[in-house]
Image (tube, rainbow, N blue to C red):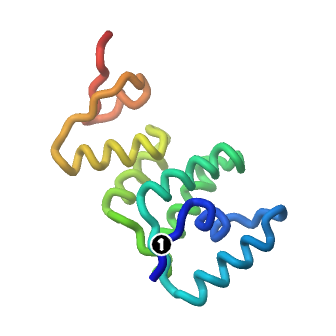
Amino acid sequence: MIAVDATVLVRLLIDDAGQLEQIKLARTLASRIGEVYVPLLVLVECVSVLENAYCLERTAIVTALTHLQTNSAFVLQDESIVLKALDLYRAGNAEFADAIVLAQAQREGLELHTFDKRLARLSGVLAVKV
């Protein structure tokens, strides 16, 4: 098993005509090794790249994340957190990074405090009043 960073993970997920050589190298590496470990932070960075650099819609990103979760070639760090965050993200109630933070806080039995008004609408999140 190997771990990858967001640059490699994006190449495994996205067919970018401008990155054909990197795509080939990433996919050959993953195929040769067989299992790819994906840290939570890498997953968060990957979603950010897919949203901002590739301008993918949330549904396309959910499809990519679901592929990672269901494909046995990928081992996700703290899969239960990823699944909870994916549900929140899929529902459109939170950005993926916020969903990860909320899922982690809830697992620890903690309330999440935020200045983010959208995030504060979620169960288990409290708005910090100024």
Instruction: Find the residue positioned furthest to the top.
Output: 130
Where residue 113 appears, as percent x and y from the top left, is: 28, 28
Give the quadrant of the N terminus: bottom left
Of residue 88 and residue 4, the one placed in the foreground of this image is: 4
What's the residue at 41%, 68% (across, down)?
Answer: 76
Dot 1: few (<14), some (14–19), or many (≥20) neighbours within 10 Å?
some
Q: Quadrant of residue 26?
A: bottom right
Image height check: is 35 above or below 75?
A: below
- At 35% from the left edge and 44% from the top edge, which residue is drawn? 101
Q: Position of residue 103 (x, y in %)?
A: 31, 48
Q: Residue furthest bottom?
A: 32
Residue reaching furthest left? Answer: 109
* Residue located at (38% from left, 48% from top): 100
Who's the residue at 40% across and 44% down the image? 99
SS of the residue under disc 1 = strand
Location of residue 22 in the rendering, given as x and y in whole percent from the top left corner: 73, 71
Q: Nearer the viewer, residue 49 or 59?
A: 49
Question: Which residue bears the numbered disc 1?
Answer: 3
Which corner quadrant of the image does residue 69 belong to?
A: bottom left
Q: Is residue 128 left or right of residue 39?
A: left
Q: In the drawing, does residue 119 fall left or right of residue 5? A: left
How many badges with numbers are in the image?
1
Nearer to me, 51 or 32: 32
Residue 108 against residue 121 in the figure, above or below: below
Is 112 situated left or right of 31 in this image?
left
Vertical comparison of 20 with 28: above or below:
above
Relative to residue 108, is residue 34 depicted above or below? Answer: below
- Residue 105 is situated, as x and y percent measured from the top left of the image, at 25, 44
As shown in the figure, which amino acid type bears the numbered disc 1? Ala
For the C terminus, give its image quadrant.
top left
